[in-house]
Image (spheres, rainbow, N blue to C red):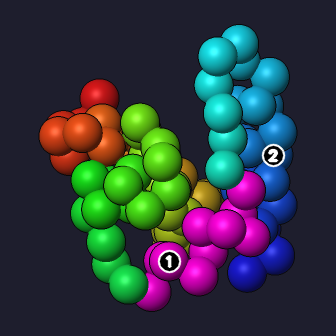
């Protein structure tokens, strides 16, 4: 889980530098991951307008694939 946590921390740090964007910390969001909530449900629970989901997968050749999804919490639509 080390690389996952490091990547999440770095992404949150960089996103927090963007004007007008409020980043909710992993300590708040991590306990919700097991509940498999939709972006709309997460947005309502956290007061967020958008939800960023990230996954990492190591390929057989040793490369790491990173997938990101930005969802509009008001509609569950991907951006």
Looking at the image, residue 63 sits to the left or right of residue 3; the answer is left
Q: Is 26 left, or right, of 57 in this rendering?
A: right
Q: Position of residue 66 (x, y in %)?
A: 53, 52
According to the picture, the residue beneath numbered tag 2 turns out to be 10
Please say if 75 is above or below 38: above
Q: Residue at x 59, y 82 (%)?
A: 31
**Residue under the point 71% across and 18% down:** 18
Q: Quadrant of the N terminus?
A: bottom right
* Residue contact between numbered discs 1 and 2, judged by CB atoms under 8 Å: no
Residue at coordinates 31% horizontally, 43% vertically from top-left? 73
Q: What segment is highlighted magenta in the picture? A: 25-34
Tell me which residue sits at (81%, 46%) in the image.
10
Q: Say if the magenta span includes residue 68.
A: no
Q: Is residue 48 above or below residue 38?
A: above
Q: Earlier in the sequence, mark 1 or mark 2?
A: 2
> What secondary structure predominates along the stretch shown in magenta?
helix
40 lies left or right of 18 = left
Q: Nearer the viewer, residue 64 or 70?
A: 70
The disc at residue 32 is 1
Quadrant showing the C terminus: top left
Give the x, y percent position of residue 78. 24, 37
The answer to whether 67 is drawn above or below residue 41 in the figure is above
Instruction: Answer whether residue 64 is visible to the viewer in this image.
Output: yes
Q: Residues within 10 Å of mark 1 (few under 14, many from 20)?
A: few
What secondary structure is marked by label 1? helix
Q: Secondary structure at mark 2?
A: helix
Badge nearest the viewer, 1 or 2: 1
């Amino acid at each position: 889980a080390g690389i996952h946590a490091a990547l999440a921390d770095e992404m949150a740090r960089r996103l927090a530098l963007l004007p007008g964007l409020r980043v909710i910390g992993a300590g708040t969001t991590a306990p919700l991951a097991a509940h498999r909530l939709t972006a709309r449900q997460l947005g309502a629970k956290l007061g967020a307008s958008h939800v960023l989901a990230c996954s990492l997968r190591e390929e057989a050749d040793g490369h790491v694939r990173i997938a990101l999804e930005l969802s509009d919490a008001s509609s569950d639509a991907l951006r």
